[in-house]
Amino acid sequence: MQANHNTDRLSLLSLLSEDIVDPTSLHQMRHLLNNMTPADIAHYIESAPSRVRRLFWELVDDDVEGEVLGELSEDLQQELLLRMNSEQMAALVAGLDPDDVADILQQLPDHLIPIVLQTMGEQDRQRVETVLTHDENSAGGLMNTDTITVRPDLSIDAVLRYLRRHDELPEITDSIFVVNRRDMFLGTLSLSKLLTASPSTTVREIMNTNIQGIPATMGASQVTHLFERHNWVSAPVVDEEGHLLGRITIDDVVDVIIDDAEHSLLGMAGLSDEEETFSSVRRSAPRRAVWLGINLFTAVLASAVINVFQGTIEQVVALAILMPIVASMGGVAGSQTLTVVIRGMALGQINRNNLRWLVSKEVLTGALNAMLWAVIIGAFAAWWFAAPMIGLIIGAAMVINLLTAALAGALLPVLLKAIRIDPALAGSVMLTTVTDVIGFFSFLGLATLFYL
């Protein structure tokens, strides 16, 4: 299969290197694209520059456009959707799962969503509206309403006859949900037990009552932790009173995991998670400019600290050579702590009960490393400049900055989250500011104290 994908890619690239408006080339490209899965088609669209993306999209067959759109990034979905009218949008999402339709519609301006919904069939509209009532980053926003339910008093034979009346089961169905007459969730009936149990056995006798329904308001990241912890393939979603609303499947959970990973990775560089590899300059430049401006402000702040000790630097030139070492070591040590804490928060492992222990552990770790490297850099600086005092000053500054870095790296994510600022996005910038300012101030301040 991988060899076929590589061949398709080489064929597409060779056609793109020729005159892509040539009718023969277009026909070949259409054939190659539409013989791929929707996920592969989306991959090739996202891997192409904007001009080629539009061409690829025009070549996609109408009957798979909706599935391909669902696989594209949110930024690209929005770009394509805004070129369509409401009827085209409704035709595009026809046949998709309600959660996928909701994800796509949420890329539209608010005033367009009701217009598109009105063009859909009554049943489809109700299902999509059910999902849209929930936050897209919650269990309710992830769920699909295509559930199969049975009552606990039914026999296995009756359940099997009921299932045979369906043309097909919903995708990724590993179990059937058991509810009472008021649609209260009671448990699950796995397909493996259903197929191996005696026909006269009742659902109540073999159903699993240990699985709890996921509250519709639960955050998407918490949902992923539950799936990982319990090795679920699908799980029920319930409202506050325990009524079954829908189900979440593993494919949606994988999407959340990937989105969270991308968010953390891009956030460390001050980039939005909407940033694409082949985003246009018009989209990329403004998004990056914001964080570059913030970084410039923090750099100016650090420079202002250096300027305060300009006289000291003029008298002891060695300080200018050694300054970057203190700031750099603090930045790296702080980033190590920051990454560990943000990861722990993402996994739901950090709370008020263990935060004090975590901070103490990180500060102690920072202290041990600070003493080790303070001795090494102090001895090196004293030998390099033949000045024991320089060695003592940079060693002391190193201890101060690494301890500060450990404390800031542990507490900044918690404080940012408390004021509803994303730690992954703002944490690294703020940490760099703290370590630079403290590093320069401690090093140059001690030098001023001992030399002037």
Image (cartoon, rainbow, N blue to C red):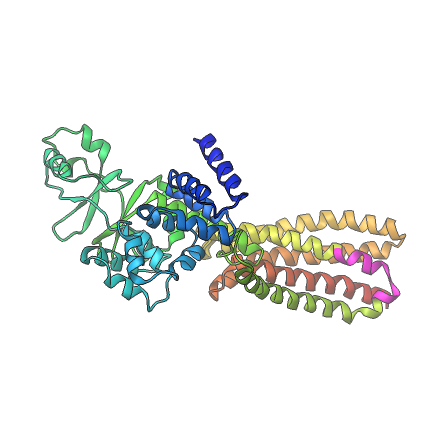
* Residue drawn at 82 percent across, 48 percent down: 380
What x and y, as percent, mark residue 417?
Answer: 48, 62
Please tell me whether residue 320 belongs to the stretch shown in magenta.
Answer: yes
Q: Quadrant of residue 271?
A: bottom right
* Residue drawn at 70 percent across, 58 percent down: 400
Whether residue 225 appears in this view of the structure is no
In the drawing, does residue 188 fall left or right of residue 332? left
Q: Nearer the viewer, residue 42 or 151?
A: 42
What x and y, as percent, mark residue 3?
Answer: 47, 30
* Residue drawn at 54 percent across, 56 percent down: 267
What x and y, as percent, mark residue 292?
Answer: 62, 63
In the drawing, does residue 396 fall left or right of residue 204? right
Q: Quadrant of the C terminus?
A: bottom right
Total count of labels: 0
Q: Quadrant of the N terminus?
A: top left
Relative to residue 308, is residue 389 depicted above or below?
Answer: above
In the drawing, does residue 257 fall left or right of residue 335? left
Q: Residue furthest right?
A: 386
Whether residue 154 appears in this view of the structure is yes
Relative to residue 268, is residue 249 depicted above or below?
Answer: above
Q: Nearer the viewer, residue 59 or 374?
A: 59
* Residue drawn at 16 percent across, 51 percent down: 183
Q: Quadrant of residue 406?
A: bottom right
Please tell me whether residue 286 belongs to the stretch shown in magenta.
Answer: no
Query: Which region is colored magenta?
Result: 313-324
Magenta: main secondary structure: helix
In the drawing, does residue 448 fall left or right of residue 371? right
